[in-house]
Amino acid sequence: MKVKVGQEIAKRVKNGEILGVGTGSTVDAALTEIHKRVTAEGLNISVVPSSYETTMRCEEIGLNVLSPMYGKNISWGFDGADEVDPDLRLIKGRGGAMLQEKILARKCEKFVVIVDESKLVDKLCEKCAIPVEVVPQARYLVIDALKGLGASEISLREAVKKHGPVITEAGNFIIDVKFSKVSNSLEKELKSILGVVETGLFIDFADEVIVSSDSEIRSLTRS
């Protein structure tokens, strides 16, 4: 299904465009399909990546990579998501690049989210926790504040191939947190906590969500 949605993204790419590119396995599938078109048709496109991981992948397949500092004329961008609710609110950031992803999304004239149908949920936090990027020194302050906001689950994300916590590109920790209800105001409440850098709640970012299933590709937009 990731290949299908990757092909849909690749079909939309036009010669001369500058694309904002997110992070994750679905994005990687789209990059593979874009590379096929670039190779076959000689398209001249450039990409602005949201993370080191995406930068390395784009360089590996020979795409023209612009600095994340690039600040204007990004034609459109695409990224994956971990959950999408009926209002196209998102949980993202399992890769830990929430801040960079939000900055890039806001620079794009249009921001498209690509997912398979398993990522669609009736309400946020149904399957995934919200990642919260936290300055290490503020870890315990933030945990106490999250409890005060009514969090049902709180855990410091541990690294897989090394001892200790996951460290973001900015040198911060990630706390994964769940709430029984996610209001539109929750993002601001979380970011008002001293020590919180960014969250994986994307409340008003997606202009379109492309969903792949075994039988079809469909497009969702906000009413």
Image: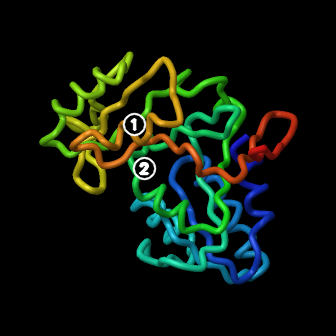
Q: Between residue 74 and residue 63, name the one nearer to us.
A: 74
Residue most toward the right?
215
The residue tagged with tag 1: helix, strand or loop?
Answer: strand
- Residue shown at 52%/30% (left/top)? 183
> Dividing the image into 4 quarters, which one contains the C terminus?
top right
Label 1 and label 2: CA atoms lie apart by 8 Å
Numbered tag placed on residue 167 in the rendering: none
Where residue 137 appears, x then y in whole percent? 12, 42
Return the residue at label 2: 98
Where residue 175 sits in the image (x, y, percent)?
A: 31, 33
Measured along the vertical axis of the image, is residue 157 above or below residue 79?
A: above
Which residue position is annotated with label 1? 131
Q: Residues within 10 Å of mark 2 (few under 14, many from 20)?
A: many
Q: What residue is rendered at 65% in x and 26% in y?
A: 121
Q: Is residue 25 left or right of residue 216?
A: left
**Pointers 1 and 2 in contact (CB under 8 A)?**
yes
State the image coordinates of residue 101 (x, y, percent, origin top left). Answer: 47, 56
Amino acid at circle 2: Met
